Image: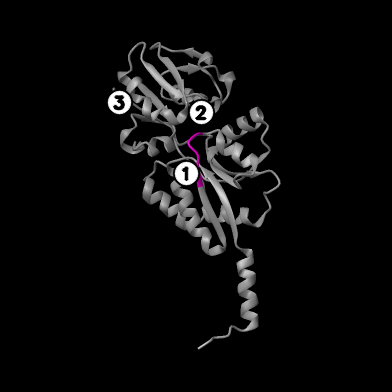
Amino acid sequence: MLRLIPLAASLALIAGMATAEDIKVGVSPGEHAEIMEEVAKVAAPKGLNIKVVEFSDYVVPNQALADGDIEANSFQHKPYLDNQMKDRGFDLAVVGTTITTPMGVYSDKIKSLDALKSGDTVGIPNDPTNGGRALLVLQQLGEIKVDAGAGLKPTVLDITENPKDLKFRELDAAQLPRSLADLTAALINTNYAIASGLNPKTDAIAMESAENPYVNVIVVKNGDQDKPWVKQLVESYHSPEVKKFIEDKYHGTVLTSW
């Protein structure tokens, strides 16, 4: 038997369908990708269909956003974004905060920083922001001192004290986990550690303090901030369901900002 839908209901259904929106969100592998998949589950019933697009490095997601290949990205902290916009001229905007992932020190050769010997080689990311962050973590851990005037982006040239005469090898952040065999130790961002099978809770020999300026952010093209889907994206990310997922899955190695 043919069932007729009342006109008012039909119009409401059509209106609901019309408000659905498809967006692509760029992420890096690991926790950023895993969390955004959960965000997509929360957003779908609200009419926001999120396609999660993974990028294997830190440069491409901002370029893809600037080019219009994706509508948003969620993988970076504010100091890195600021540096990218300054160096590459991207016109992007922060619309919300997400998580903090303390950087860890990992090694296949030693079990603690006390075991670092004179002349040992330490790997750090080769981008200015995360490389600088790695040096600041080593300073925080008492291994080196850097020039305070360098701010959040010191380089190896800004090291003022290096008692163990550590050598530094600057590599692409995504390559550091695979390079541990060639290094005494490396400072690795949590997303790349997790993506490579490392467990920050059990495998890191030292961790950055949770008190740091590196909270991650959701970014869109400048001018898109007031679009309805942006509000839906941020609200879905900041939902109780996503917060519970993060707390249950990462057990304190990934910290929420809300």
Q: Is 193 on the left-hand or right-hand side of 4? A: left
**x and y percent of residue 167 in the render?**
41, 14
Q: Is residue 103 above or below residue 225?
A: above
Q: Secondary structure at mark 1?
A: helix
Q: Earlier in the sequence, mark 3 or mark 1?
A: 1
Q: Is residue 241 above or below residue 6?
A: above
Front residue of 89 and 17: 17
Q: Is residue 22 above or below residue 182?
A: below
The residue wearing badge 2 is: 130
Q: Residues at badges 2 and 1 in contact (C-beta under 8 Å)?
A: no
Front residue of 28 and 189: 28
**x and y percent of residue 70 in the render?**
59, 46
Q: Is residue 235 magenta?
A: no
Q: Is residue 50 above or below residue 110?
A: below
The residue wearing badge 3 is: 108
The label number, if any, that marks residue 32 in the structure image: 1
